[in-house]
Every structure is written in C-alpha cells, then in structure tokens.
C-alpha cells in the first residue's frame, strides 16, 4: 500500500488548550490516554500526536512523565508515537527542546510564529533549526506543522540549508482554521499544495468547525488526515464529540469511501522512515 492508495490517520487526542473541567471526556491521565489510543488504533489510527497533562490535568512537559507515556504507548499499542514539541503557548523553548530526550518515534516541529487565538505561538527560526538538528541526531522523524502559508517557505529554507530530516522523508501537517493562521477551506489547502516540497506527504486537520471541510479537501487532494479532540470537540452542529475514536472512525469511513483506506502503522513507518524503538536504542542523549 503506497501513500497514494492508503490514508495515514493521526489522532491528536488531548492537546494543551482544552480544560478538563470544560471537556470531561478529554483523556488526561496516562490510563485514559492509553485506553483512547487503543480504541483509536482499533478503528484506523496509525499515529498518535501526544500532549500530556500533569497535576490537576494541566499541560506539562515533564520529562519523566513523557518517557513513561512513550513507553506505555509503545507497550500497549502499535501506534507511531509522536510527541508535541509545541506544548502550550506558555512553555519555554528549553522545555520544548527537552521533549526530544524522551526519544519518541516522531515529534512535531512548527515552522513559524503564529497568532493563536488571543495568544502567540512562538517559533523563532533558530529554535526551529535546533529542533530539526536535534531530531536528526536522535533519529526522530519530524512532522512539520504548518499554520500559515509562509511557513511552507520556511520549510523549504530549512531543508535547503540543513538537509533532509531523520528518515529521509518529509511529512507535513497543515493545521488549518486556527484564529490567526490560515483558514480551513479548500482554496487554502490547494494553495498550500503548490508549496509542499516534492516527494513529501501531507496530512491536514481543521480546527473546530473546519474539521470536516478540511478532511474532505485533504482526501480529495491525495492528502492524509489528522483528527482528534485537540482540534475539535464538536462532532456536528450542536453535538459534542463522544470520544476520540468517534472522530477516527468517521475519518476512516471517509478514507474508505475515497478508496484510500487507513494505512496500518507498520506501513506508515515505512512511508515516513520511522525506524521504531530498536532504531533508537543506540542513540545517546
Ligand atoms: N498547543 C499549541 C500551542 C504542536 O503540538 O506541535 C501548539 C501545538 C502544536 O499543538
Ligand atoms: Zn499539538
């Protein structure tokens, strides 16, 4: 199954923005995260994009917790484990860089600063380069997160100046519909495609009510999908999401209808150049 005949489905189950008090079904403990991951894997997810929570369900980048999370997800699922280096908008760069010491299979790498609702999500050029280089050293496969079109120009600049990432393959995730970033609509997705590096794969996710239009646009353009409660907590107008597996199941159904069924995790590992745990065992941090 090649990327053109199958769909990579990534689930982003938690994020750093929703409060557990407002969204009681948000997975925040390790047990909840693993159970969500297993449910999502069963219905078609191949990769999980992970933000963890700590005391009182607040976002944290605590290294020991991150290592435990990677170990538990590897032990209890076959999903590709991607840690967020984006964290929360308040997280310092040093903590975000330290995430890589948990040696996940993959990690996110946002390609520029963007207004993020009422906040600012800071991603300086030197910080991006540092993330890219440390991931190369550790054999961690990046997913380049794109919140606005200019960030694709920055991705070209990064690859031109600093070379291909670990695994040798470029995978991009278009995060659309963030207030302050690019809109979540078909026209913008098509505009982004012109700037995706040759040979790269891309997925897309639409925040909030842009979830469905972005999903359909991405499938029709040969792209892959990210879904999950990090990005939307509304399933349909006036209807809250039941759980992450509900979102993955809908994505998997649409992928099947599109004749590009969900790709199993081991196939996705090959596509993205993820070596897995054994490939990382010798890497000293
Ligand atoms: N939580 C956002 C500030 C990522 O995970 O890399 C950043 C984010 C992107 O979610
Ligand atoms: Zn994230």
Image (tube, helix red, strand yellow):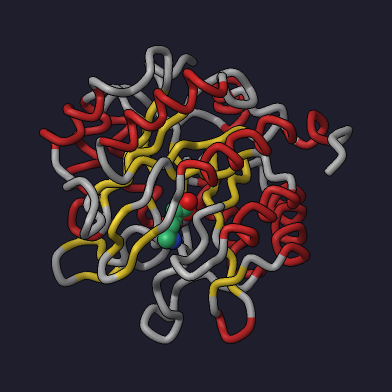
Q: Position of residue 202 (x, y in %)?
A: 38, 29
Question: Position of 11 compared to 192: left or right?
Answer: right
On the picture, is 176 further left or further right than 97?
left
Residue 237 in picture, x, y percent from top left? 14, 65
Q: Residue at x 11, y 33 (%)?
A: 187
Is 47 positioned to the left or the right of 258 in the image? Answer: right
Q: Number of marks in the image?
A: 0
**Image quadrant assignment for residue 140:** top right
Q: Quadrant of the C terminus?
A: top right
Residue 245 horizontal/vertical position (percent):
44, 55
Q: Nearer the viewer, residue 57 or 136?
A: 136
Residue 244 in sight in this render:
no
Between residues 123 and 249, which one lies in front from this camera angle?
Answer: 123
| Residue lying farthest to the front in this orientation | 126
Q: Is residue 171 above or below residue 28?
A: above
Identify the residue shown where x is 74% and y is 52%: 102
Q: Is residue 179 above or below residue 164?
A: below
* Residue drawn at point x = 71 percent, y = 27 percent: 275
* Residue lying at the far left of the rendered structure: 187
Please say whether residue 148 is visible from this viewpoint: yes
Give the answer, above or below, for where 283 lies relative to 249: above
Q: Position of residue 256 (x, y in %)?
A: 33, 30
């Amino acid at each position: 199954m090649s990327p053109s005949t199958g769909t990579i489905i990534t689930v982003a189950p938690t994020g750093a923005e929703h409060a557990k008090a407002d969204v009681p079904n948000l997975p925040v403990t390790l047990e909840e995260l693993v159970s969500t991951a297993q449910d999502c894997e069963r219905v078609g997810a191949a990769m999980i994009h992970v933000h963890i929570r700590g005391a009182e369900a607040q976002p944290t980048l605590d290294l020991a917790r991150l290592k435990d999370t990677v170990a538990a997800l590897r032990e209890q699922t076959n999903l590709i484990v991607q840690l967020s280096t984006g964290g929360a908008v308040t997280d310092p760069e040093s903590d975000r860089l330290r995430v890589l010491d948990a040696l996940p299979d993959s990690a996110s790498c946002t390609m520029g600063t963007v207004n993020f609702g009422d906040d600012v999500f800071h991603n300086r050029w030197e910080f991006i380069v540092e993330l890219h280089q440390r991931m190369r050293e550790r054999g961690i496969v990046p997913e380049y997160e794109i919140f606005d079109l200019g960030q694709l120009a920055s991705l070209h600049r990064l690859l031109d100046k600093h070379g291909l990432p670990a695994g040798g393959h470029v995978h991009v995730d278009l995060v659309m519909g963030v207030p302050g970033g690019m809109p979540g609509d078909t026209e913008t997705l098509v505009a982004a495609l012109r700037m995706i590096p040759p040979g790269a794969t891309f997925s897309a996710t639409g925040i909030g009510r842009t979830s469905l239009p972005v999903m359909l646009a991405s499938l029709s353009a040969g792209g892959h999908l990210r879904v999950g409660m990090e990005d939307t907590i509304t399933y349909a107008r006036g209807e809250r999401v039941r759980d992450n597996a509900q979102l993955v199941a809908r994505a998997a159904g649409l992928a099947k209808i599109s004749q590009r069924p969900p790709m199993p995790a081991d196939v996705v590992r090959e596509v993205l150049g993820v070596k897995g745990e054994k490939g990382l065992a010798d890497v000293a941090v």
